[in-house]
Image (cartoon, grey):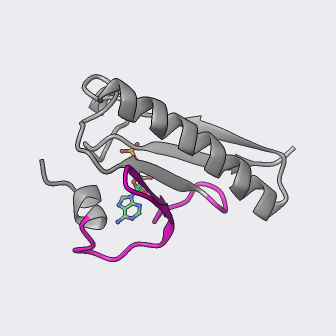
């Protein structure tokens, strides 16, 4: 399944990469709702949590937590939201699993 995120993963289109390893890529959101808003995306294709592999999901959440803590330290803010939209009806626009990390203050 070809999505904007698979093109980013394959470096066919540019993105502001925050972190990358064999399993995931983290990029800064192009339309941030708060400074430091980024996305963690598994490289293996799944649409959302309804079809993601369990091992990939565990690693995705582990990395999202680790990177969120790093980002809020960098920004010197106190908290963050971790959001995963699943399906059009929940607001999912890009049909490739991704975690939103949104730093928040106080
Ligand atoms: P969702 O509504 O959960 O599917 O969120 C998709 C997110 O992807 C939105 O926050 C968009 O701003 C973001 N987005 C879409 N295209 C890009 C892109 N090329 N680079 C970075 N973020 C993107």
Ligand 1 falls in quadrant: bottom left
* Number of callouts: 0
Q: Is residue 92 above or below residue 14?
A: above
Residue 64 placement (x, y as % from top left): 56, 43
Residue 99 placement (x, y as % from top left): 47, 42
Q: Nearer the viewer, residue 10 or 55?
A: 55
Q: Is residue 5 left or right of residue 25?
A: left
**Residue displayed at 25% across by 42% down:** 95
Q: Is residue 97 above or below residue 74?
A: above
Residue farthest along the left direction in this orientation: 1
Q: Nearer the viewer, residue 42 or 77?
A: 42
* Magenta highlight: main SS: loop
Membership of 27 in magenta stretch: yes
Residue 35 falls in image quadrant: bottom right
Q: Is residue 55 left or right of residue 17?
A: left
Q: Is residue 5 left or right of residue 21?
A: left
**Residue displayed at 62% across by 51% down:** 67
Q: Is residue 44 above or below residue 10?
A: above
Residue 28 placement (x, y as % from top left): 51, 64
**Residue displayed at 24% across by 36% down:** 47
Q: Which residues are magenta?
A: 10-36
Residue 90 placement (x, y as % from top left): 38, 28
Q: Quadrant of the C terminus?
A: top right
Membership of 26 in magenta stretch: yes
Q: Is residue 75 left or right of residue 27?
A: right
**Residue displayed at 30% across by 66% down:** 8
């Amino acid at each position: 399944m070809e999505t904007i995120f698979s093109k980013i993963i394959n470096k066919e289109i540019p993105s502001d990469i925050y972190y990358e390893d064999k399993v995931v890529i983290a990029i800064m959101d192009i339309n941030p709702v708060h400074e430091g808003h980024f996305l963690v995306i598994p490289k293996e294709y799944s649409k959302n949590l309804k079809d993601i592999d369990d091992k990939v999901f565990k690693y995705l959440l582990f990395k999202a937590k680790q990177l969120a803590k790093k980002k809020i330290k960098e920004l010197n803010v106190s908290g963050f939201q971790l959001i995963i939209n699943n399906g059009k009806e929940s607001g999912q626009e890009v049909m490739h699993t991704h975690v939103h990390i949104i730093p928040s203050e106080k």
